[in-house]
Image (tube, grey):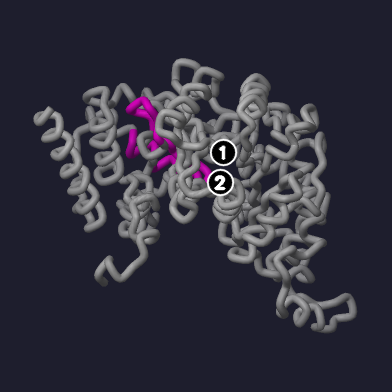
């Protein structure tokens, strides 16, 4: 179809689909690893899914058939009819209560959430986009610490028209957020004549797998107060802090200490990571700003959670014995898997940023680069995807300012698959990075590399003409 028949919004380049982050997914999908049918295929290590505790969910479902048969206590099917009919966008009250209580439980019940201040959305993608629609006009900006989740380029910019200004963080302090970095990003936005409307963070961090320190959170609170900005805290990994519960401090705890900032701080949550249910599309916005709640509730009509999903999860999350046991066991499994990846990488001379949360590690492969450049990072990434057969996410796709860092996921595969991935990577490192298993590039890869070469050629010509 001729692009002129489509709107400028859908044909603009802000979607981010051309990122190496998404290209790796495409190459995995055309050649996915399977231990029987395709043992030489690409292993997916670029997907932050939690598949380690499915058996806990399945066991609960098997012992609670009433959660899925939609019958009343007397055995009648009137409940099915009730759920099948139209539901307004406020959501089922029972589910909102259960979700609010689960969010509190994940935070050690140090804070509480008012169900009436929750807005339900179809996943955290919808939640983040709805908040940006509510808080910013097209052309206004949010500051985000780097490295950050590559999908934010799509989620926050594509349909809203908002801009992202990176807050450059460095490995010299473990990629910690600092006041100078915040001020520098704000100055750069001002120089570009962009109105800054807020800061967005992920805590625990995707892709770092770290929790923010009290000093970082205090610095953030001081900054948004001084600049009169909003703060969006994406806390979808809040139940994955697997070292000690005290490591994760929710921004809700900061609000409790600074109630005068409550109208400026908004939380995004989802059951995709902590409960491992990305396919259920369950997300939420929590805000104590009544205007934001009202506006976001209207926005949520474009991405609702199905009534049967809400009913099922209200039953599951309402089972306090189950949630208490699940939280503990899930963290134990994440800790064990994290340990296995870190040690497996260490055995082949690859180190990771010290982390305590998430479904991934931030892996340092700078010593494997031929040159200290992003071009060399892409060369290494290409070898790892096409020749080693591992889809990992290069740091440049996360807007990292230092070449050679990669996000590697560990919770979306079996232990045997992780062992095979480490074996493949070990053989690659021992061979000195020699490309031994040639794989034919797919159409998406060829087109992507062609665009990169063209861009590099244009930049070279521009430099020569100066």
User: Can residue 374 be spotted in the picture?
Assistant: yes
Instruction: Check the image and name the residue furthest to the front.
Output: 193
Residues tagged 2 and 1 counted as in contact (Cβ below 8 A): yes
Tell me what residue is drawn at x 53 percent, y 48 percent: 137
The range drawn in magenta is 399-425
Indicate the secondary structure of the residue bearing disc 2.
Answer: loop
User: Can residue 352 be spotted in the picture?
Assistant: no
Q: Give the CA distance from mark 2 to mark 1.
A: 6 Å
Residue beneath label 2, please? 136
Point out residue 45 in the picture as x, y percentages from the top left corner.
Answer: 42, 44
Residue beneath label 1, please? 197
Classify 395 as above or below 1.
Answer: above
Tell me what residue is drawn at x 62 percent, y 44 percent: 236
Foreground of the two, 384 or 175: 175
Q: Is residue 421 magenta?
A: yes
- The disc label shown at residue 453, or none: none
Q: In which image quadrant can residue 242 be found?
A: top right
Q: In which image quadrant can residue 319 be found?
A: bottom right
| Side of 280 relative to 34 (left or right) | right
| Side of 396 relative to 63 (left or right) | left
């Amino acid at each position: 179809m001729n692009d002129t028949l489509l709107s400028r919004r859908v044909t603009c380049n802000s979607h981010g689909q051309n990122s190496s982050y998404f290209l790796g997914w495409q190459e995995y999908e055309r050649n996915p690893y399977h231990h029987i049918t395709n043992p030489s295929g690409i292993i997916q290590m670029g997907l932050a899914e939690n598949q380690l505790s499915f058996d806990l969910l399945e066991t609960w479902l098997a012992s609670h058939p009433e959660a899925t048969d939609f019958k009343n206590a007397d055995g009648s099917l009137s409940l099915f009819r009730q759920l099948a009919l139209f539901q307004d966008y406020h959501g089922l009250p029972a589910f909102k209560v259960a979700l609010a209580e689960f969010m509190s439980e994940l935070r050690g019940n140090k804070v509480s959430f008012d169900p009436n201040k929750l807005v339900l959305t179809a996943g955290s993608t919808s939640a983040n986009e709805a908040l940006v629609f509510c808080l910013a006009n097209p052309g206004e900006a949010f500051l985000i610490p780097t490295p950050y989740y590559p999908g934010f380029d799509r989620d926050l910019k594509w349909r809203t028209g908002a801009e992202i200004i990176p807050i450059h963080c460095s490995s010299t302090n473990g990629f910690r957020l600092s006041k100078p970095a915040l001020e520098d990003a704000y100055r750069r936005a001002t120089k570009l004549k962009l109105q800054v409307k807020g800061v967005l963070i992920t805590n625990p961090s995707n892709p770092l797998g770290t929790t923010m320190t009290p000093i970082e959170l205090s610095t953030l609170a001081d900054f948004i107060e001084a600049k009169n900005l909003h703060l969006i805290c994406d806390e979808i990994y809040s139940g994955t802090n697997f070292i000690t519960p005290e490591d994760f401090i929710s921004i809700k705890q900061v609000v409790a200490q600074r109630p005068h900032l409550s109208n400026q701080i908004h939380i995004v949550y989802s059951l995709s990571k902590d409960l491992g249910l990305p396919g259920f599309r369950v997300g939420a916005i929590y805000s104590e700003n009544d205007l934001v709640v009202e506006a976001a509730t209207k926005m949520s009509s474009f991405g609702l959670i199905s009534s049967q999903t809400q009913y099922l999860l209200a039953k599951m999350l309402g089972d306090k014995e189950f949630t208490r046991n699940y939280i503990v066991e899930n963290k134990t499994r994440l800790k064990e898997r994290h340990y296995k990846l870190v040690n497996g990488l260490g055995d082949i001379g690859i180190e990771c940023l010290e982390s305590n949360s998430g479904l991934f590690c931030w892996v340092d492969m700078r010593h494997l680069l031929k040159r200290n450049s992003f071009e060399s990072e892409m060369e290494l990434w290409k070898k790892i995807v096409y020749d080693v057969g591992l889809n990992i996410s290069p740091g440049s796709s996360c807007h990292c300012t230092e070449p050679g860092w990669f996000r590697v996921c560990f919770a979306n595969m079996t232990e045997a698959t992780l062992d095979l991935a480490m074996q493949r990577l070990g053989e690659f490192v021992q061979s000195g990075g020699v490309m031994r298993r040639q794989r034919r590039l797919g159409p998406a890869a060829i087109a992507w590399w062609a665009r990169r070469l063209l861009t590099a050629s244009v930049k070279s010509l521009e430099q020569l003409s100066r």
